[in-house]
Amino acid sequence: MSGELGSAIAEHARREGITAGSWVRRVLLERVAMISAVDARSGRPVRRPDEDAAAISAAVRELAAVNAALSMADVAAARQSLTTVREILIPLVIRRAAR
């Protein structure tokens, strides 16, 4: 890419308050008449560490157990499952905030 083209792209992107890469993706999406929220967004994609994804999956499964316990009027089991969800999610949130 020539310096002149790069500068023009950077200027257009600056005026729109986005990165040059994001501006180029948006122009390309318009040109090919495609809609893609993933490609249109600004910034780099956020990759969640595998251990975070596993923790979130475990919490979601445990929330299903809460629902099952409540449907059977088993309040004690529902409370225990909610405690487990908290034990999973609170450290996850604290780790994310520390990053």
Image (cartoon, helix red, strand yellow):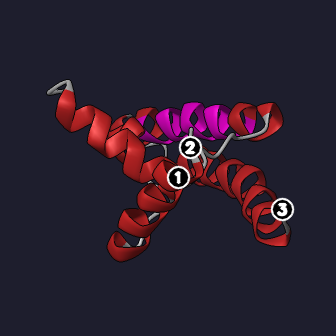
The answer to whether 38 appears left or right of 4 in the picture is left
Q: Nearer the viewer, mark 2 or mark 1?
A: 2
Tell me the residue that label 1 is attached to. 6
The image position of residue 74, as x and y in percent, is 48, 42
- Report the residue marked by disc 2: 2
**In terms of depth relative to the viewer, which is nearer, 28 or 35?**
28
Q: Which residue is mark 3?
A: 95
Provide the major secondary structure of the magenta segment. Answer: helix
Q: Is residue 35 left or right of residue 60?
A: left
- The reply to whether the magenta stretch includes residue 39 is no
Within 10 angstroms of label 3, few (less than 14), some, or many (20 or more) residues? few
Q: Considering only order in the chain, which callout, 1 or 3, is on the residue closer to the N terminus?
A: 1
Q: Secondary structure at mark 1?
A: helix
Residue type at tag 1: Gly
Task: Name the residue at 60% across, 37% down.
Answer: 62
Above/below status of 68 relative to 89: above
- Give how far apart the Cα atoms at labels 2 and 1 are: 6 Å
Instruction: Give the magenta range.
Output: 55-67
* Quarter containing the N terminus: top right
Quarter of the image holding residue 18? bottom left
- Residue 89, percent from left and from top: 70, 55
* Marks 2 and 1 in Cβ contact (< 8 Å): yes
Using a 10 Å C-alpha cutoff, classify the residue at mark 2 as few (fewer than 14 neighbours), some (14 to 19) or many (20 or more): few
Q: Residue at x 55, y 37 (%)?
A: 60
